[in-house]
Amino acid sequence: MAKAKTIYFCQECGHESSKWMGQCPGCRQWNTFAEETVERPKHASSERPGSSARPVPLSEIEMKQEERFTSGFPELDRVLGGGIVPASIVLVGGDPGIGKSTLLLQVCKNLSIQNVPVLYISGEESLYQIKLRAQRIGSFTDSLSLLCETNLEVIDAVLRRAKPRVVIIDSIQTMFSDNISSSPGSVSQVREATSAFMQLAKGLGITIFIVGHVTKEGVVAGPRVLEHMVDTVLYFEGDRHAAYRILRGVKNRFGSTNEIGVFEMRGQGLAEVANPSEYMLSGKPKGASGSVVACSIEGTRPILLEVQALVCRSNFGIPRRTAAGTDTNRVNLLLAVLEKRLNLRLGECDAYVNIAGGIKMNEPALDLGIVLAMISSYKECCIDEKTICFGEVGLSGEVRAVNMAKQRVLEARKLGFTTCILPKVSMETQMGSQMDVEGIRLLGVENVREAAAKIL
Ligand code: TYD
Ligand code: MG
């Protein structure tokens, strides 16, 4: 017996309430509650669930060889943890127009060339529009089929009949089930659709990629529950005006998170950027003050970035401090450290810090880069172009150790840097016996004063 019930859901975070409220207690947004009817089946007391369930000791569980298969994009495979896992659900979130549909259509193309049966289900675009996009991307084989459909029951029937190996759902916010009265994109529809797809994925052994739109706060629109339900969550991000895009893993049941894949949007779709450091450093000005190359780690991968700073006399009583691509509070803190420990008169200066290329990085190892860029701009001196730095800066001005120092140094050497300023502790403990890696000079520093002395 099913009982229909009215529940109010917050459309931002999915908070449930039995009555309407002006402000959501979950996410503190105003006016986000919408009424939805849900049906809760009632268990008859005779059919108590769980009578046949049996816990299994860990040792009795058989290990199956995971047969992952490639998406044709090594960058995407790495973010997924080494390839596509059969019967998994992957959520791809991102701003509109960032290239989610393009990326997944290209995955379809790569899979269709490997003769993997793929089905692309679009609730947003017509077959004609998809064809137009496909023509820009390249040639496909017939193992890709397309379907324009938003009704879950119809999709369910099609999948059971066609049994593809990979399905793309573009997008989850357009899917709806007849059993639920609320409109597509509402919390209960999204939740229902995701759980239906999850059952299909596990039951039929299909890998499903789901596209999800993001809200202005940058999380997948609708409920956070969506992220809890799927196996893997990827975010596709980047500045819409810049060409490069970053695919970031934020949840992965089959691999590590914080891996990133870098792509570039071209006329023929997305192209992989195999060497992001080179890409990020292209266009670095020569002989300019306030610019230094720093090294950050994303996942397991070192990326070199240009940190820029502009420190100039303030025209107003209260100096302005802004940071693009990194945390403004961190920049304020580092300014205070410099003021106190190096006696720089930064209190009367505006300071602007920018990580070039529009990338966002918040790793503490960037601190030394920010500090040196600010000193360089304040003192109007240029830092040698072939110098790179990394290290965390503490409140007493000490330069603290960071992890994976060796990888960072090797990446710098690969790109032709000849000097590396790094925390002394990292140099002594992590670089092993070879204090100087061949081809690159290591300068260990203990505090910001020593670091500043190396560049002045
Ligand atoms: P799209 O995949 O439609 O974004 P999403 O599905 O995330 O909303 O991406 C569309 C943008 O990408 C669009 O603004 C045009 C651009 N684009 C290219 O620059 N080159 C291409 O080959 C394609 C297919 C799209
Ligand atoms: Mg799209």
Image (cartoon, rainbow, N blue to C red):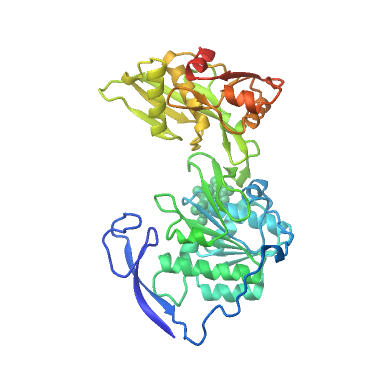
Q: Residue at x 51, y 34 (%)?
A: 357
Q: Is residue 284 visible?
A: no
Q: Residue at x 60, y 74 (%)?
A: 158
Q: Residue at x 30, y 24 (%)?
A: 319
Q: How many marks?
A: 0
Apparent side of residue 289 relative to residue 132 in the rendered image (left or right): left
Vertical placement of residue 36 versus 297, above or below = below
The one nearer the camera, 425 or 349, is 425
Vertical placement of residue 334 versus 105, above or below = above
Vertical placement of residue 118 versus 245, above or below = below
Apparent side of residue 339 relative to residue 61 in the rendered image (left or right): left
The one nearer the camera, 174 or 256, is 256
Q: Residue at x 43, y 13 (%)?
A: 379
**Percent x, y for residue 174?**
47, 65
The picture quadrant where one finds residue 26 is bottom left
Vertical placement of residue 196 versus 28, above or below = below
The picture quadrant where one finds residue 182 is bottom left
Q: Is residue 193 visible?
A: yes
**Percent x, y for residue 427?**
62, 24
**Percent x, y for residue 304?**
58, 30
- Quadrant of the snapshot with the N terminus: bottom left
The picture quadrant where one finds residue 200 is bottom right
The one nearer the camera, 42 or 377, is 42
